[in-house]
Image (cartoon, helix red, strand yellow):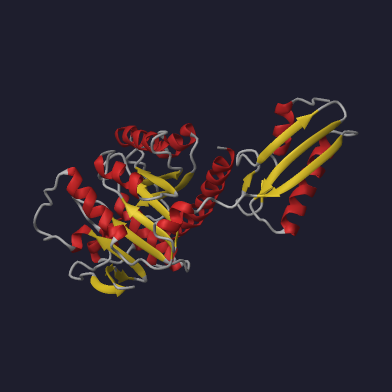
Amino acid sequence: MDLSREYVLEVLGKIMDPDLKKDIVSLNFVEELKIDEQSITVTVYSSNPALHARKRLQEAVEFNLKREFEGIVINCTVQALPAEAKEAHRKFLPEVKNIVAIASGKGGVGKSTVTANLAGGLAKAGYRVGIVDADIYGPSMPTMFDVVNDRPTMIDVEGKPKISPVVAYGIKILSIGFFTDQDNAVVWRGPMAAKALTQMFTDAEWGKLDYLLIDLPPGTGDIHLSLVQTVPLDGAVIVSTPQEVALADARKGINMFKLDTINVPVIGVVENMAWFTPAELPDNKYFIFGRDGAKNLAQGMGVPLLGQIPLVQSVREAGDVGKPAVFQDNTPTSTAFEELVRIFVQEVEVAKAQKSLKKQHV
């Protein structure tokens, strides 16, 4: 009988947290593990604090260990996951549950298209959603939601003037494009751009939101650093196409968020333009930018793959006319984005649970 720590963890790695849909070992939910010749003592966390949920998890742990290690006494304790420290959120956008940045190392990979459709898919699923278009030098959201000619209004909130975001398809939107001439270039130095971005958070009335998505400019520059210093991000999503020139920059983007000085969880990678499918041949796939590049990148860097989005003409057309493709029901594209939304919601909860555990152990 192999009573090594590695083998015991291998057995525990077959037990799934039912809410987060991942095994308790990869979630780092095994808090304490003691092994001797007669017994195994283990403490694990449950993402669901309810007594019946913890009891089911305890039964699963005991059943799997007793089946593998006959005659060994199993002592299992299941604790509720500690509540996430909320001090930062209470001071900054207290009514926003999740703040997630959408980033790319390289321009032209469809980051804004992914952001718009992710927001649309979340809204379609019943979540309250907002978007901050932080791509200061190339704001796209006014066009993608057909609100180019709209302007935010000012409202009074407890005696203070606040910016009220533009609303499209139930999504609250603020973009630098609302405050500048669309035909003129935005020529701002880093500090000025960072200040404009900050004001879209601090001077706006966002109200209650389940998700606030931030469409970042490409690269790893001043805007990104200012953002993480100002906004308590719950995570970041990296968008890339499959070809190597984009993957090299996506790799830098992932590493930027993992820096100790930034320390923002990477929710996962979205592979955009994963293959080309012509409208007249919906079952055909042409891998014109390479195959599974971002998928392999995610696997190699130990971050989830959130989805693979095909390159379809209707996605571009939908963005140009201001109605994201996710709103086209029963199409391959809308199905791909809906699956992206499902996995995204799940992985945000996983990242927050793991972040909570890290704070507990600091």
Is 125 on the left or on the right of 102, as rendered? right
Q: Where is residue 148 in the image (x, y as percent from the top left)?
A: 19, 66
Q: Residue at x 32, y 41 (%)?
A: 288
- Quadrant of the snapshot with the N terminus: top right
**Of residues 159 and 128, the one drawn nearer to the viewer in this rendering:** 159
Residue 256 vertical position relative to residue 235 in the rendered view, above or below: above
Residue 293: quarter of image: top left
Q: Is residue 357 left or right of residue 101?
A: right
> Is residue 319 in view?
yes
Q: Give the quadrant of the C terminus.
A: top right
Residue 118 visible in this rendered orientation of the protein: no
**Residue 94 placement: quadrant:** bottom left
Which residue extends farthest left? Answer: 184
**Of residues 167 and 263, the one drawn nearer to the viewer in this rendering:** 263
Q: Residue 232 at what x, y percent from top left?
A: 40, 50
Q: Position of residue 235 (x, y in %)?
A: 43, 47
From the viewer's perspective, is 44 left or right of 86?
right
Residue located farthest toward the right when viewing the structure as drawn: 71
